[in-house]
């Protein structure tokens, strides 16, 4: 039975309520977390505010940076333990979980090293005046994260906020709070002062909503679904606080007839089966020029049929999906596509030894998928790839931009001019050219266009989101 972390203390919910922790690999309950409430959110926000006015708020950038870098080292020292926690909680393969912990450490190294390199500016103004632009922390920042990459997401969201000197309140997803709780202990041992990080566990509609609507916060970073993102933005608007929204995606792989097929095909398969397709940046649409459609999609299908699904310990390409609701949702998309007659080009294999009580779905490649079909337009958030042919460059761009989303895209061609033209015409926060980068890349500014959200995380740009400028105008005669 776990406890929450508020103001440097480990606490149960004030009313003793708990939530079960279920293993996606076998459907068994193996732990409990506190089911927090608005009361614990009040306490966490107050503790964070006190931290901004206390020991944490008095540190300079160099001192904060040292602490963050020590946290990065401590995470690496606990890599195997954290990876085991993460794999059990999410069901993901062990090697994926280990990589996620490395990325978590990397966020703290990167932003730790950046903490004392955020400079202000001077601005030429009227004679007799000196104007300087300072960059200051916002105060108390709220972080609501999803269940697909719990450790990576907490690093991505918290590290830049802490580097700038904010004090943070984290609401992990109710399905996956364990790595965040263990992380809080590790970060505290590494020297993070009391109140700089508070972790409140519980249900989204209870603690998540209480945090998003709390009058004591100064900023919200939300990663999750479009539905909840809209609620969070409404809550932020009521308090006039800024929010960064990282929402869903339906990212296209745009493959032209001069593609280096042997290089592209395995990367394309990996980009959809990675993390069982539960990646906001999953390459879930495979758009292929008609002249090579059959040949190239055939190559992808051959690799796709070799994808194996199993428990974290089996460490195959793909684990179970997160929970029963998610399994049913993904299965519904597969069943509907089959029922409407869309051809199945390949299926992965679920290991026969995988417990039948686990939440496993068969990775499935469909094609050609009609352009208006839900599979071509909606985020499945599972290992389902929709192949579609296009005619020429203009048609490829139209098709790529034909969803509500705009998170990531990849362009595959050996023609340099076409790479540049298509990359510039595609609506997305990141475009990969002859490669694909779902996850990782802490240095690279990341975020959505259109319904995929707004604001940027990762890279140095994230520091601007969690800070504000102050303009000082001094008349010196
Ligand atoms: P979700 O929106 O249901 O939950 C996300 C978080 O919001 C959880 O912590 C949840 O407890 C909390 N929440 C739920 N209801 C809330 C409410 N009323 N008020 C405040 N908080 C609330 O999303 P999910 O199912 O956990 O994650 C899947 C979605 O997240 C997918 O759409 C996926 O594309 C998206 N996602 C986006 C990114 C990105 O960076 N763009 C990354 C990962 C996931």
Image (spheres, rainbow, N blue to C red):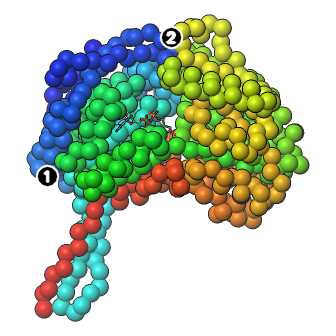
Residue plotted at (15% across, 81% down): 474
Q: Give the percent coordinates (x, y) of residue 16.
A: 19, 17
Residue plotted at (70% across, 17% down): 349
Q: Quadrant of ligand 1?
A: top left
Q: CA distance from mark 2 to mark 1?
A: 48 Å
Q: Nearer the viewer, residue 51 or 346?
A: 346
Choose the circle earlier in sequence order: 2 or 1. Answer: 2
Which numbered disc covers residue 26?
2
Residue plotted at (67% across, 37% down): 375
Quarter containing the C terminus: bottom left
Q: Nearer the viewer, residue 297 or 397?
A: 397
How many badges with numbers are in the image? 2
Q: Report whether residue 281 is seen.
A: yes
* Residue 139 shown left or right of residue 458 in the figure: left
Quarter containing the N terminus: top left
Which numbered disc covers residue 162?
none
Q: Give the percent coordinates (x, y) of residue 150.
A: 42, 32
């Amino acid at each position: 039975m776990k406890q929450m972390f508020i103001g440097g203390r480990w606490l149960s919910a004030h009313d003793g309520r708990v939530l079960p922790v279920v293993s996606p690999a076998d459907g068994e309950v193996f732990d409990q977390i506190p089911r927090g409430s608005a009361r614990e959110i009040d306490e966490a926000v107050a503790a964070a505010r006190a931290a901004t006015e206390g020991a944490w708020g008095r540190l300079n950038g160099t001192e904060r940076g040292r602490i963050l870098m020590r946290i990065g080292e401590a995470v690496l020292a606990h890599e195997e333990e954290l990876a085991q926690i993460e794999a059990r909680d999410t069901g993901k393969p062990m090697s994926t979980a280990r990589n996620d912990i490395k990325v978590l450490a990397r966020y703290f190294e990167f932003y730790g090293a950046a903490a004392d390199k955020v400079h202000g500016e001077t601005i030429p103004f009227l004679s007799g005046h000196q104007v300087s632009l300072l960059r200051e922390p916002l105060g108390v920042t709220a972080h609501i994260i999803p269940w697909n990459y719990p450790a990576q997401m907490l690093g991505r969201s918290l590290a830049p906020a802490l580097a700038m000197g904010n004090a943070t309140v984290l609401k992990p997803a109710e399905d996956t709070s364990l790595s965040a709780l263990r992380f809080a202990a590790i970060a505290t041992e590494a020297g993070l002062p009391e109140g700089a990080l508070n972790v409140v566990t519980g249900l989204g509609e209870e603690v998540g909503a209480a945090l998003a609507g709390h009058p004591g916060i100064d900023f919200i970073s939300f990663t999750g679904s479009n539905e909840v993102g809209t609620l969070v933005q409404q809550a932020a608007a009521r308090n006039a606080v800024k929010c960064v929204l990282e929402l869903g995606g339906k990212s296209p792989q745009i493959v032209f007839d001069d593609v280096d097929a042997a290089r592209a095909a395995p990367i394309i398969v990996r980009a959809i089966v990675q993390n069982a397709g539960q990646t906001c940046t999953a390459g879930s649409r495979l758009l292929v020029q008609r002249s090579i459609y059959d040949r190239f999609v055939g190559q992808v299908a051959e690799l796709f049929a070799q994808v194996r699904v199993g428990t974290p310990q089996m460490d195959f390409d793909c684990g179970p999906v997160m929970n029963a609701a998610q399994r049913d949702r993904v299965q519904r998309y597969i069943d509907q596509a089959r029922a409407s007659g869309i051809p199945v080009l390949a299926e992965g294999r679920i290991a026969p030894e995988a417990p039948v009580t686990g939440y496993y779905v068969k990775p499935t490649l469909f094609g050609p998928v009609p352009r208006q079909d839900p599979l071509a337009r909606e985020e499945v958030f599972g290992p389902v790839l929709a192949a579609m042919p296009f005619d020429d460059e203009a048609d490829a761009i139209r098709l790529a931009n034909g969803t509500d989303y705009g998170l990531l895209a990849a362009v595959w061609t050996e023609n340099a001019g076409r790479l540049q033209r298509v990359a510039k015409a595609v609506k997305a926060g990141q475009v990969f050219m002859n490669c694909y980068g779902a996850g990782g890349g802490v240095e690279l500014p990341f975020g959505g266009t259109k319904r995929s959200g707004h604001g940027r995380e990762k890279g140095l740009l994230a520091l601007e989101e969690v800070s504000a400028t102050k303009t000082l105008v001094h008349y010196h005669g």
